[in-house]
Amino acid sequence: MEKNKKLNFALVGCGRIAQRHSELLGTGKIENASLSAVCDIDIAKAEKIGKKYNVPYFEDAHEMLKKMGEQINIITILTPSGMHAKNCLDLIQYKKHFVIEKPIALKLEDADEMISACNKNNLKLFIVKQNRFNLPVQKLREALEEGRFKKLNIGTIRVRWSRDQKYYDQDSWRGTWLNDGGVFTNQASHHIDLLTWMMGPVESIFAKASTRLSNIEVDDTGVCVLKFKNGALGTIEATTATRPKDLEGSVSILGEGGSVEIGGFAVNEMKVWNFVDSIESDKDILRDYKENPPNVYGFSHLRYLDHVVKCVLNGSDNLVDGLEARKSLEIIHAIYQSIETNKEVFFNEQIKSSKLGIG
């Protein structure tokens, strides 16, 4: 595709997260990108977004692609997590690139099929992991790549968010094993991605979970201990049972050479930046790497979609392709396998939850 050509996005699914994608694409906030059409099996949801941004809206994705296929470059799948694979594989015949909200799928075999199908058809597969584009996270990654941490000791993520019963009752798929998964799959998947992006491959996992405050099939609270292949340890604390409101979404990395903690409720604020061998620019980090987003989505969907456009138009490297996104899904399956068996799960063995994506 020629450089600087505008890319037209079509949304499949017009639920909660579609409000964010449509607002960015429909108001010209992403350079060289626009919103061209939307669809949802609930036509009222599609109509609401379509009319708001003056684009065609449909009840059926095939109808949308058949009528507007030549005008569409990228299909963005924003349906329930358990539908991602079906939607992607069903629409691959139209030969469009895909942007898919996290997670890539709920079942590992579905993720593998999606990756294989996109590769076979020479299509790009982008999985939305927007927190990688948060400014403090980018700075943390830079320090890691520069070797400033030296030997890594421990990595921690905390997701202390509030999702009440009203949130889960919005849609019938929420809080189900078949189409949603629990707090590890839905809310903490971004943070799990960040933890392993920083700490590297996992050797083993042991986890516990509970359903504390919500009437749902799945967990709303869980904890996890990880051992990484480099010998470092990790911890995960995740809950949607924080009350009365979101408290934090954070990541901490501690090593021989220094310690960094990023906090805020959307991994948006540099809290700690301490290194044994300090450099001149360190003194300004806490001041310069702080963002104040209005909600847990943060600002980074904009940066992420800009990244997608540059990858397609200019051939830039895809930071989170299907294979990269599969890593965090495998960890989530290991977490649930550990919870289901009450045993430590090792990554040199077959990993598969008996519930996630199945019900």
Image: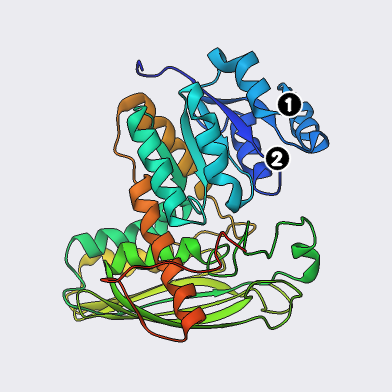
Tell me if residue 230 comes above or below residue 343 in the rendering: above
Quadrant of the drawing holding the N terminus: top left
Tell me which residue sits at (45%, 46%) in the image: 127
Residue 24, image x, y percentages: 60, 37
Residue at disc 2, secondary structure? loop
Tell me if residue 24 comes above or below residue 79 in the rendering: above
Tell me which residue sits at (73%, 25%) in the image: 57
Quadrant of the image occupied by residue 276: bottom left
Quadrant of the image occupied by residue 331: bottom left
Q: How is the image coloured?
A: rainbow
* Residue type indicated by callout 2: Cys
Q: Count the marks: how many?
A: 2
Tell me if residue 253 comes above or below residue 305 in the rendering: below
Residue in front for this viewpoint, 117 or 174 = 117
Q: Nearer the viewer, mark 2 or mark 1?
A: 1
Specify whether residue 315 is in view. Answer: yes
Specify whether residue 140 is in view. Answer: no
Residue 121, image x, y percentages: 37, 27
Tell me which residue sits at (54%, 13%) in the image: 70
Residue 259, image x, y percentages: 30, 78
Q: Residues within 10 Å of mark 2 (few under 14, many from 20)?
A: many
| Tag 2–tag 1 contact (CB < 8 Å) | no
144 sits left or right of 240 in the view? left
| Residue designated by label 1 | 58
Tell me if residue 52 comes above or below residue 4 in the rendering: below
Residue at disc 1, secondary structure? strand
Quadrant of the drawing holding the C terminus: bottom right
- Looking at the image, is mark 2 or mark 1 earlier in the sequence? 2
* Residue type indicated by callout 1: Phe
Q: Which mark is residue 14?
A: 2
Cα distance between the residues tagged 2 and 1: 11 Å
Tell me which residue sits at (40%, 52%) in the image: 325
